[in-house]
Amino acid sequence: MNEKIISPLNRVEGDLDLKVVFRGNKVIEAYPMSRLFRGIEIILKNKYPMDSLVITPRICGICGGSHLMSAVEALDMAYKAEVPPNAVLLRNIMALAEMGQNDVRHTYLMFMIDTVNKKYEKMDFYKDMVTRWAPFYGTSYKAAVKWSKRYTEIYAIFGGQWPHGSSMVPGGVTADPYPNDILKARGIINEITSEFIEKVMLGGPLDQFLQLKSVKDLDQWSQDYPNGDISKLWIYGREMKWDKIGKGSNFLMSFGHVPSAEDYTTENPKLRFKRGILNLDTMEFSSIDQANMLEFVTKSFYSYSNGDIGLHPFEGETNPLSPFSNDKYTFTKTFRYKLNGKLIAPEVGALSMMAVDNNPLIIDLLNKLGSNVLLREIARFVRLAIISEIIIEELEKFRFGEPTYKKPLDIAESKGYGLVEASRGSLGHWIVIKDNKIFNYQVVTPTQINMGPEDSYGNISHMSKALIGTIVEDIENPIELAHIVRSHDACMVCNVHVLDGNVEKMVLRL
């Protein structure tokens, strides 16, 4: 057996060490490790509840708006807020704009540039991949840099700034846009759609792409519009065997996203993107109850007061230990969901979000290929196409002269939670308020769900499952493992919510 630690695995948000054990060229063990502790949950204790709207967006510099939306939904519930339709629309627009910029940046600036790896040099289409996706010089790479910034302009119109805006508050938003603000946002998203989504990403008309429902349709699209990046990704990705690696969990989970403006409610919202769990073995859908969520710290650098048990986030604890604790190896907590009496370790992300929402193209791809690296990237293209249309729809629903805020009740003792889909997957915030102060605050992030260590029963999480069994062509250039990790758009900064652990390791740069 041969053990390696890839450190740092770059082009991942934050610090990630990946320990893998090989038998020959096959991965037989995998341990994603986060050695950075930030302590946001501890910082929030005893603060005024509204302070969470300023502190939690600082968890991440790329998806702070998602943390803000999750935090404000938790406060909406705690304060029994009634949120006007206009405010829900603006929250949705900001959240989707942030998701758009992240999906573009992840796909082109973090993931696709791996196509220039030396493993693929002898492939006939290597020159085309370099021309399109090479960092700094590729045509699509440069377009992604330009157009991803335009999404953040939409966010800033209504949020005042991006990143780290705090414009969402319990009861609504702080913005009251003029007609020219809505027109400006519409102009930006229309320009992104015509100049980037259609010309670069899809290679054809958006409305036609949204009609694709099957692998056969995607094959036909690739023939009709061969110059789009999705066509190249679909064709080249299978040649590079991305559809053969990174399966992972049999359960795809999504917290759902884009609540209805007309009948906004916090506990059982009507969502544009469904909330639930899809069993890939049976293709059966199950609804989600947040009461069934647990966090374990068996292999994490934390301790619980009552021993090695699973805690629901309302009762969650963040008691950090030294990173040299025996039998523990990461600051990532372990997430589990109790489904039909059994603990499952689901996958979250764009693929899960599209699959749980029963997108016909993604469902047919899953039925024929199963989950894999290629499908996760295809799902982001599909999601980008869909959210462009939804942003336009939400902008058109805005009604001038109607309120964007309604003051909520001032409740001294309460609790609430907010479940949203961040760019990287399912995100939840839980707050407990006592004496008008934060008594407990817990955050469950997408990367935590995907990349947590083993639970107290020895069961591994999704990312480890996705890595184990992978055959690497060249152990000194394990690009296959990088593909698997990066296909999840991992964010270790969100994951560990400063303390460095010094570990003896072999440095392997990809």
Image (spheres, rainbow, N blue to C red):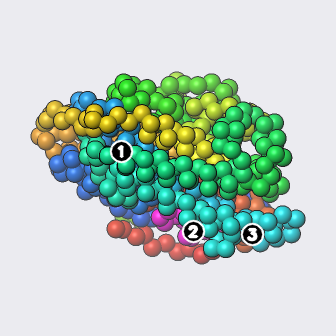
Q: Residue at x 76, y 61 (%)?
A: 472
- Which one is in front, 480 or 379? 379
The number of numbered discs placed on residues in the rendered structure image is 3
Residue range in magenta is: 1-17
Query: Magenta segment, principal secondary structure?
Result: loop
Tag 1: amino acid: Pro
Q: Secondary structure at mark 1?
A: helix
How far is the residue under mark 1 from the one under mark 2? Answer: 43 Å
**Do the residues bearing badges 3 and 2 touch, measured as CB atoms within 8 Å?**
no
Q: Residue at x 69, y 44 (%)?
A: 205
Q: In the rendering, which numbered label is found on residue 263?
A: none
Q: Give the labeled residue for mark 2.
A: 10
The picture places residue 461, in percent across and down from the top left corner, at 56, 46
Q: Residue at x 38, y 59 (%)?
A: 163
392 vs 228: above or below: above
Tag 2: amino acid: Asn
Q: Give the labeled residue for mark 1.
A: 179
The picture places residue 39, in percent across and down from the top left corner, at 32, 58
